[in-house]
Amino acid sequence: MMGREPIGAPPPGAAEDVTGVDSVAGVVDETVGGGRGRRWLEEYLPAIILFVVGLGGWEMIVRLLDIQAFLLPAPTVIGTAFVENFDRLMHVGWFTTKEALGGFVIGCGLGIGVALATARWTAVSETLMPFAVAANSVPIIAFAPILNNWFGVDNPLSKMVIVAVIIFFPMMINTVRGLTLVDAAALELMRSYAASEWQILRHLRWPNALPYMFNAFKVAATLSMIGAVVSEYFGGNRSALGIFITQEAAQFRFANAWAGILVACVVGVTFYVVILLVERVALPWHVSVREK
Amino acid sequence: MDEAIVAVKGVNKVFEGRGGQRTVALQDINLRIAPGEFVSIIGPSGCGKSTLLRVVGDLVEPTEGEVMVAGKSARAARLAQAYGIAFQAPVLYEWRTILKNIQLPMELRGFSKEEKESRAREMLALVELADFGGHYPWQLSGGMQQRAAIARALAMRPSLLLMDEPFGALDEMTRERMNLALQAIWQKTETTVIFITHSIAEAVFLSTRVVVMSARPGQIMEEIGIDLPLPRDERTHQLPRFFELLNEVRSSLRRAEGVHDGA
């Protein structure tokens, strides 16, 4: 009797299962064994070579063409300035990083909060979205002097608010998209389960929105450092990276200014990489994270 | 026939288009299905067969008429999880492993951890995916994903299984294997099945009854009882009666398509 036989006993033509097992085995292979270090090297070697060649080329061009330091100092000169001013750079760098982080948390928190609130009432979010998209294309940094005025130019909160305002719109727009652009069949499945709005949010809309949110986090990470440094250009506490850069440049210590820029770059990139790593851990299932 | 598990009485469904044009998706549908039956609904594209399935599942509201499922209104039956559903796409949530996907309906109902775990494992074994519970959907082939979707549909031990062209996207070989698997599951679980399909062979092989629909408006043209012996297996395809029934359904479909063409 058929019913007693194993249901999917693979006959010779079981192409379906063969491909399935193959792809599974492929995935397993990559996580086991020593291939990982080599794969990593293969993936990043071109970038490392490009970086080294780029720096070397920069150094050579500056020396050969005898370019003036106020136009472009050589990497070695910037490196020396970095070492000489290390303590001060760390001090001002940390100060600005705190502003960027504070702004990041406030901006992302508000963006996600408003997105959750409005996505619950589709009509509200549909009304708000055009405004949010329009606001997103406004150069918000232009408001920096005004916000400095509102919150006090020496108050780090004024910088955090600028960062938060810059981050808010991309964060909110992306989260709303992730919460609302849900597969129609996946929603229908939820309805067949008689799931409540809350359950649909928790089990479908929220996980669906996470990849969108991580994209926004990456944008926000970059924007937060830009926002913090540029808002400091408009004045404020003297122990800040933006102030350091403008003052050193004003006093023709261009290598020092470049060393400050280097700190801003390193912090920005680090911030981005941290979010990338968190994404890998948090979304092991997502296309962007899957092992190739 | 008081013990019908599905009773559709005088159902009409009209969709109002944007420009005010009305599309009659279903017209005067009457259908009774007894417990344990396997009923396939077949018809040309746009004949409203998917709409009919959704009306039974209370995912689409009929414009007129009455639908009873398991002795309750269609809405009450949905709220009581009286049916499981499988779509053409597997619709597995990509952030959940196969096991967690199958547990989803139980999770929404607040089942205990042990109950969820043991029942999901049981369903995985039933669809021959016991070793794949920890995998993500994208790590499995299309046929395996569809089997996982069927396991999920069966997780609540529903008395009724609604299937909307579940194997439509699979290649022919996989499809035949899935048909054998579904046939065996149906025998084991004694679930009633409503099965939407485009394939005549699939409908005849699986069903105890084939319902033929015509398009625009979607109407039931004919019902053909399938008296092939149970259980069915590879040999069923060789039976002379199988070919007779194929031809019967095919000519019925042709009549269904011709009805409105000539007018």
Image (cartoon, rainbow, N blue to C red):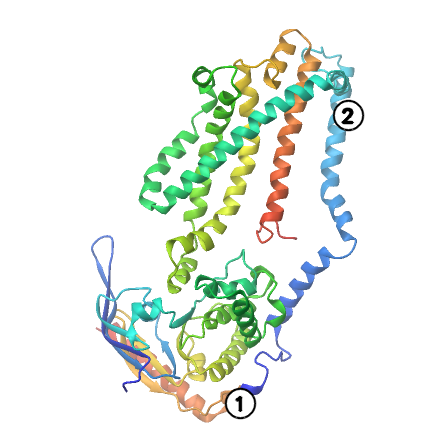
Residue A230, percent across and down?
54, 20
For image coordinates 27% across by 85% down, the residue present is B2
Q: Quadrant of the C terminus of chain B?
A: bottom left
Residue A38, percent across and down?
78, 48
Is B76 positioned to the left or the right of A215 in the image? left
Q: Is residue A135 above or below residue A174?
A: above
**Mark 1: which amino acid?**
Arg
For image coordinates 43% across by 39% down, the residue present is A113
For image coordinates 57% across by 51% down, the residue present is A286
On residue A56, the disc is 2
Of residues B43 and A241, the one drawn nearer to the viewer in this rendering: A241
- Mark 1, Cα crowd under 10 Å, few <14 / some 14-19 / many 20+, is few
Label 2: state its secondary structure.
helix
Residue A97, percent across and down?
60, 26
Q: Quadrant of the N terminus of chain B?
A: bottom left
Residue A146, percent across and down?
43, 16
Q: Is residue A38 above or below residue A170?
A: below
- The reply to whether residue B52 is in sight is no
Q: Which residue is mark 1?
A: B235
- Mark 2, Cα crowd under 10 Å, few <14 / some 14-19 / many 20+, is some
Task: Kindly check if marks 2 and 1 are in contact, taking CB atoms under 8 A apart as contact.
Answer: no
Is B116 positioned to the left or the right of B35 in the image? right
